[in-house]
Image (spheres, rainbow, N blue to C red):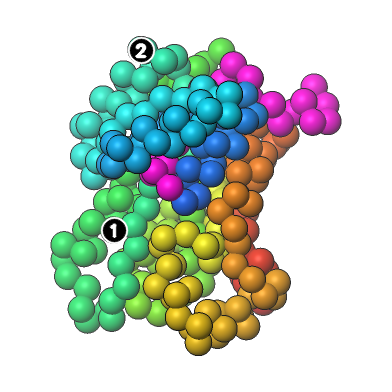
């Protein structure tokens, strides 16, 4: 296999967590366009169905499963059910995440636990469930969505930064544990994108102007730009990559 054929995902099954919008939705769309059957998860059932219908309207194959990522038993059950009814998965995109803006002294125990549970613990639980149920007839790929916050500190985001730094470390550890069993584990670390998560900052002209000064490309990313990179990391085009953290931030962390 060579050239563009290496990016094709025909016959493969991908699970994308947190795909009710933003980067997760765009990742799911791109995987489906590359030929994968996509199973998307999230808490908002109505929105999940809308994303599935959008993918199917473009000729892709997609299914939805409602899921609370903070419920490990439910998470494991979804992976087992998908393997039984849709097929053993080949690809996992760990995208589901939450942010919490607060001064460190105002972060409660519940705030901390929620962010760590969704952004880090669920990534481990989903990865473990995927490894138990994956298709062992060919190589598999896990792509964790980290953040530029895995590399730098972000004021007022103690829990988020800790969780995403943990995702980067977990990615490396999982890569070493699975390297000889036909599983590649990499992470994509996006910077600021025009999604709901940084919407409050981007809605403020002065804050946006200050942010853009820190980004060498002088713009935020567009959600659809993430899709091709996710396909690369999920496909045979990156079959010699594992344990990598790919910065995708307009040059922000290159400074």
Residue name at image x 63 percent, y 51 percent: 225
Residue name at image x 41 percent, y 15 percent: 86
Extreme residue toward the right, this view: 3
Asked whether 199 or 245 is in front, the reply is: 199
Extreme residue toward the front, this view: 57
Marks 2 and 1, the one that precedes in the sequence:
2
Asked whether 249 or 223 is in front, the reply is: 223
Is 169 placed above or below 20 here?
below
Which quadrant holds the C terminus?
bottom right
Is 183 placed above or below 113 here?
above
Instruction: Name the residue that disc number 1 marks.
Output: 115
The image position of residue 103, as x and y in percent, is: 28, 81
The image position of residue 107, as x and y in percent, is: 22, 73
The image position of residue 26, as x and y in percent, is: 53, 44
How many neighbours does mark 1 have within 10 angstroms: few (below 14), some (14-19), or many (20 or more)? many
Instruction: Name the residue that disc number 2 marks.
Output: 84
Is 79 placed above or below 23 here?
above
Viewer can see residue 91: no
Q: Which residues are magenta?
A: 1-21
Residue name at image x 20 percent, y 78 percent: 106
Asked whether 210 or 137 is in front, the reply is: 210
How many neighbours does mark 2 have within 10 angstroms: few (below 14), some (14-19), or many (20 or more)? few
The image position of residue 96, as x and y in percent, is: 38, 47
Residue 228: quadrant of the picture: top right
Contact between marks 2 and 1 (CB within 8 A): the answer is no
Residue 10: quadrant of the picture: top right
> What SS does tag 2 mark?
helix
Q: CA distance from mark 2 to mark 1?
A: 31 Å
Asked whether 153 or 196 is in front, the reply is: 196
């Amino acid at each position: 296999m060579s050239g563009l054929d290496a990016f094709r995902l025909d016959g493969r099954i991908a699970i994308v967590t947190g795909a009710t919008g933003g980067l997760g939705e765009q990742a799911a769309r791109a995987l489906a366009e590359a030929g994968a059957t996509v199973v998307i998860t999230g808490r908002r059932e109505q929105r999940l169905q809308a994303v599935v219908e959008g993918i199917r309207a473009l000729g892709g194959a997609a299914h939805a499963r409602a899921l609370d990522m903070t419920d490990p038993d439910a998470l494991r059950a979804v992976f087992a059910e998908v393997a039984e009814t849709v097929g053993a998965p080949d690809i996992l995109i760990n995208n589901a995440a939450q942010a919490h803006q607060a001064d460190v002294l105002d972060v409660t125990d519940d705030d901390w636990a929620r962010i760590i549970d969704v952004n880090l613990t669920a990534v481990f639980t989903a990865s473990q469930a995927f490894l138990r149920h994956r298709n062992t007839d060919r190589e598999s790929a896990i792509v964790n969505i980290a953040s530029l916050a895995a590399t730098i500190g972000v004021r007022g985001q103690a829990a988020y930064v800790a969780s995403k730094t943990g995702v980067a470390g977990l990615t490396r550890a999982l890569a070493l544990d699975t390297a000889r069993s036909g599983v590649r584990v990499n992470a994509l670390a996006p910077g600021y994108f025009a999604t709901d998560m940084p919407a409050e900052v981007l809605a403020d002209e002065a804050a946006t102007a200050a942010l853009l000064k820190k980004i060498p490309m002088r713009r935020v990313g567009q959600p659809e730009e993430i899709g091709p990179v996710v396909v690369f990391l999920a496909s045979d085009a990156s079959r010699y990559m594992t344990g990598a953290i790919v910065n995708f931030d307009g040059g922000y962390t290159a400074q």
